[in-house]
Image (cartoon, rainbow, N blue to C red):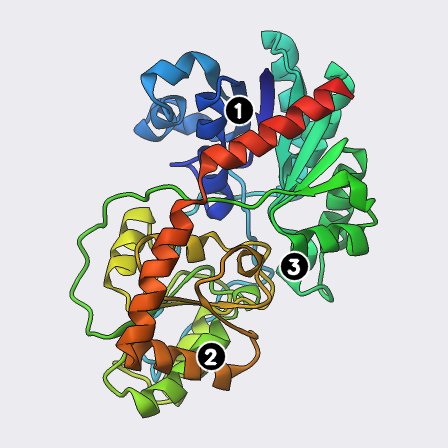
Amino acid sequence: MKVLMLGWEFPPFFAGGVGVVCEALTRALVARGLEVTYLMPFDPGAAGNPRGLRLLGALPPEAEPRFCAAPVPGALLEPYAQAEPARAVRASAAQAEPPRAPALYAGDLLARVDAFARDCAELVERRGIEADVIHAHDWTTFRAGARLRRQLGRPLVVHVHITEYDKSGGDWADPAIWALEREGMAEADLVIAVSQRIKRVCVERYGIPAERVRVVYNAVEPGPAPAVIPHLPEPMVLFLGRVTRQKGPAYFLEAARRVLDAVPEATFVMAGTGDQLPELIERAAQLGLTGRFLFSGFVDREQAAALYARADVFVMPSASEPFGLVALEAMQRGVPVIVSRQSGVSELIRHTLKVDFWNVEELAASIVAALRYPVLSEELRWRASSEVRRLTWDAVAGRVAELYREQARA
């Protein structure tokens, strides 16, 4: 079976969890014998550097004949644009503002989405690329997927990892992005949602018939070797993710103040960057957390692995989380995990502590319990590691391939 896959990123050229999922799923599909041609935006200036070469060699040599990564010429693109530039941090803040993630994207995102659709269509025609099914990841590629569906006459599967409704909390959704999401889902022959939570959003907020939405949960694969990072005091409680309202970092910060009353030797690390970072640094100073609450800024995958290895507890207090791959990564590293009940991953995993994201007292009590009671901590470590070993990308690829065949026969 030939799959024409459309993605906005692919490691090492990626900005978040969707890129990790695209790589893992592509590897697993190819290992099952499917041919995958992967189209993505690309910086022409990077064509000769190791990043571009690694993209083309992302799979084992024996798999490469079945995998073709075809970069589509275009400008770099901004995946999580901010409406306003980050404001300066006051001198009284706990520390200077940490470094931001390296800029992968820039420019007019909506214009580039249209250009990507046009460029994909031209490239497919020029190269004579064939496909049995088209698979588009998230709204930035939906328009390209719909155009190729009409051009090739093949079924379109769209994969919803997150929606504008989730990112904005619903009330502040960008109408242009919401419309593109709705348009892509409506034109698709099948919608894959990463959780039941996202399926409900697709049905209730975007009007997609429930029978056209299937849930396929993500999995996790062994991560990279940990980087060497400076010593961190123990015990350490970790938050890793975008520092945005959706991820609930403010609840993590407020819980830290309460935990330190009971466990004064604890250290909290917030790894990531985002529009809420400056105000949270100021809030940490106001709460007197200087020296006990550290902001690392952006971390790459190797640095993240090192933080998991040092962490005594991992917390994902997301207010609206379609899935939450970082929770599985932490579990795989043997870290006791606390997740919000408002996350997709909470539907899939059992051996974690679960809290409502807004309940700071419950969150703080759960952190204290995981730090103070070794029996609970060890039970979570052992059972979570065992549970996550069964969540393989091969199984995910098998389910996705089954959906491909279903659509190809329709």
Q: Mark 3 points at which residue?
A: 166
- The amino acid type of the residue labelled 2 equals Leu
Residue in the picture at 55% in, 54% down? 323
Q: Residue 38 carries which label?
A: 1
- Marks 1 and 2 close (CB-CB < 8 Å): no
Q: Residue 363 carries which label?
A: 2
Q: Which secondary structure lies at badge 1?
A: strand
Q: Residue furthest bottom?
A: 261
Residue 47's place in the image compared with 372, above or below, is above
Q: Which secondary structure lies at badge 2?
A: helix
Quarter that holds the C terminus:
top right
Rounded to the nearest whole Å, what is the CA distance between mark 3 and mark 1? 26 Å
Residue in the picture at 47% in, 65% down? 243
410 with respect to 49 (left or right): right
Q: Give the foreground label among 1 and 2.
A: 2
Residue in the picture at 64% in, 39% down? 159
User: In the rendered structure, which disc, 1 or 2, sits on the residue that comes first in sequence?
Assistant: 1
- The amino acid type of the residue labelled 3 equals Asp
- The amino acid type of the residue labelled 1 equals Tyr
